[in-house]
Amino acid sequence: MEKFIRLTGVAAPLYRPNIDTDAIIPSREMKRVSKEGLGEGLFADWRYSDVAARVPNPDFILNRPPFEKAPILIGGANFGCGSSREHAVWALKDYGVRCVIAPSFGAIFQGNCVRNGILPLVLPEERVAALANAADPRPVTVDLEALSLTMPSGEVLTFAIPPADRQMLLEGLDPIGVTLKRLPAILTFEAEHLRRHSWI
Amino acid sequence: MGSTLVEKLWSRHRVADLGDGTDLLYVDRVLLHERTGSIALKELAETGRAVRHPGRAFVCMDHIVDTRPGRGDDTVMPGGTAFIRETRAGAAAAGIHVFDIGQDDQGIVHVVSPEQGIALPGLTVVCPDSHTCTQGGLGALAWGIGSSEAAHALATQTLVVRRPRQMRVRFEGALGAGVGPKDMILHLIATHGADGGAGHAVEFSGPAVSALSIEGRMTLCNMAVEFAAWTGLCAPDAKTLAWIDGRPRAPKGADWAAAVADWAELRSDDDAVFDREIVINCADIAPYVTWGTSPQHAVPIDSRVPALEEARDATAATAWRRALAYMDLTPGQSLAGLPIDGAFIGSCTNSRLSDLRAAAEVLRGRKVAPGVRAICVPGSMRVKAAAEAEGLHTVFLDAGFEWRESGCSMCFFAGGEHFGQSQRVVTTTNRNFENRQGPGTRSHLASPTTVAASAIAGRLADARVQALLPPAAKA
Ligand code: SF4
């Protein structure tokens, strides 16, 4: 998995509550059994005024310079709620987004981010609102080692993230490989679990 | 200090404490479907990792299969056939059973798993699908995951999971006539918000939950995820045992006796401590319908679209304005009486036999209003057969409903079938998000009873108000 250590870039405000995974990647944009090429369908219903013809909607933030290549999104509360589709995260990644800042995230989406090298960064609602309203076109810097967010003004905010998620992102770990190191413990547990619950 | 039901299930499955509030949990059942499961199987195959227990994994073909009679692998969704065939081939290579198109047992994964006896009280059940919490209605610890986690669960029979906080929602009193589990959960989400359960495992309890059928409990748990809960569940009781006994994959003989003895412990202790407790008086619950584009945009059907001033803050007011524009509604407008174009009965929320019976009770002897397209999609082929055995299909067909083969169908739009641009649809599904049921489709979530009454009236209708409905024809 790709590591996430430090990132400098423009943060695009998309500050609405409950942005669901159907909005991030509409179902009909998941065309193949593949993680690749999904960036084109990212926010398709908002990003294109004619989805089929791929006509850009000039009002949508990712179609407005300098936000069109923003590697950071500023979302509202409960970002990524709804369907479990990991395609939402693959689409963000394919488009080039590596960090989403929001007051809170849908639980499955948040886990999917970490597993794909995208940092889900939680800040208090007022902070996120202020960031979004400022819509500053200058880059910010996210530092996962220092747990800091440096604003264009030079102001430095700090954030928290569960240590296991931080380690996974910093080291780009393969989660299955990490768990398989515990296979002996799993086998011991399993034998006892199945002995007690024969019907499983 | 006692333990909650979730804490008990958790400690039964904890392989290792990974620190920092996360544990490695043992997974008893992994369920997959052709939409997101195919990619998990592909990922394992590509990395050369094996499925540890193929016998405890199952695949359901449900999400993009066609539901029109005479169907095969072809679907109206562009590229859909490839999803179906790749999933089938991946499952065969891994030795995983498939509930496939053309079989008597095919259906929506969250309907099939309980009815087959795959999900059972006390088991951990995961599926790369957010409505896996439906299966909590049986007392299983069941939650939705991503595709990468599904690959992890298949390869290791475990998942790394953060311990949720504990919430109990008690439904006191009894439900009024014409009010059901769908109205209970919409009431909860409307009053406490679509993010009200974030970070929590929610146990639904109280006399009104005990009084619900097992199918009703599954409807309740189904929408726990729309409350942003990690999962929802109900403690198993005598009704649960009666419902499970004799199902194809349920334990038999000595195993059954051992399981029943074990399941007796699966309840929260009297002195268990919950981080949060919500008490709802069922006398306050009316039939609900949504007016906006989030399940929290729900109100009793006999009330009005709220005024923007009622939003809790400016962000919510902006979201409401956007939702009203999408839904083509104005504040203060009454919901009952709003003309509809379509009616849909189906999805893992409301497509079990009890749901079809509730709808048929309203439909019997009546006709769907002219100009309304009405569709019923049973949750599984078993549900369909059971409904046909008691003649329900003729009630639906005589009323003017389409009577389909099983699948997710128009619960979500994958590029195939939909009701059409700007069509107003009253639906028993669980998500009224923008474009969820099709480009521009305006979805109003409601119970099967409300959907049936609305289909007859040609407008959103309160089934309790007989005057809104034309009289049933004399048999
Ligand atoms: S019926 Fe709808 S909500 Fe349920 S599993 Fe299928 S698509 Fe998801």
Image: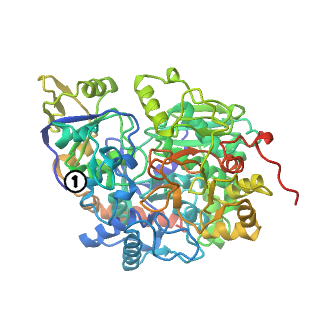
Label 1 sits on what residue type? Asp
Estimate the x, y position of residue B250 in percent, counting from the top left: 61, 68
| Residue A109 position within the rendered picture, expressed as x and y whole percent measured from the top left | 35, 47
Whether B381 is drawn above or below B132: the answer is: below
Q: Can you give x and y, in whole percent of width and height, for residue B78 in the image?
A: 38, 66
What is the residue that sits farthest to the right in this orientation? Answer: B474
Q: Closest to the observer: B162 or B193?
A: B193
Q: Could you tell me which residue is drawn at 29 percent across and 64 percent down?
A: A34
Which residue is at a point 49% across and 48% down the rendered structure image?
Answer: B441
Give the quadrant of the N terminus of chain B.
top right
- Position of the C terminus of chain B, as image quadrant, is bottom right
Q: Nearer the viewer, residue B328 or B310?
A: B328
Residue A15 in view (yes/no): yes
Drawn side of residue B122 relative to residue B162, left or right: right
Disc 1: CA contacts within 10 A as few (<14), some (14-19) or many (>=20): some
Front-most of residues B132 and B473: B473
Question: Element type at marker 1?
Answer: helix
Asked if disc 1 is less than 8 Å from ligand 1, the answer is no
Residue B258: quadrant of the picture:
bottom right
Q: B398 left or right of B188?
A: right
Q: Quadrant of residue A102 in the image?
A: top left
The residue under label 1 is: A94
- Is residue B272 in sight in this rendering? no
Q: Give the camera-side residue of B108 and A60.
A: A60
Residue depicted at 15% across the width and 27% down the height: A151
Residue B87 placement (x, y as % from top left): 39, 72
* Chain holding disc 1: A
Furthest residue in direction front, as rendered: B371
Extreme residue toward the top, this view? B309
**Colour scheme shown:** rainbow
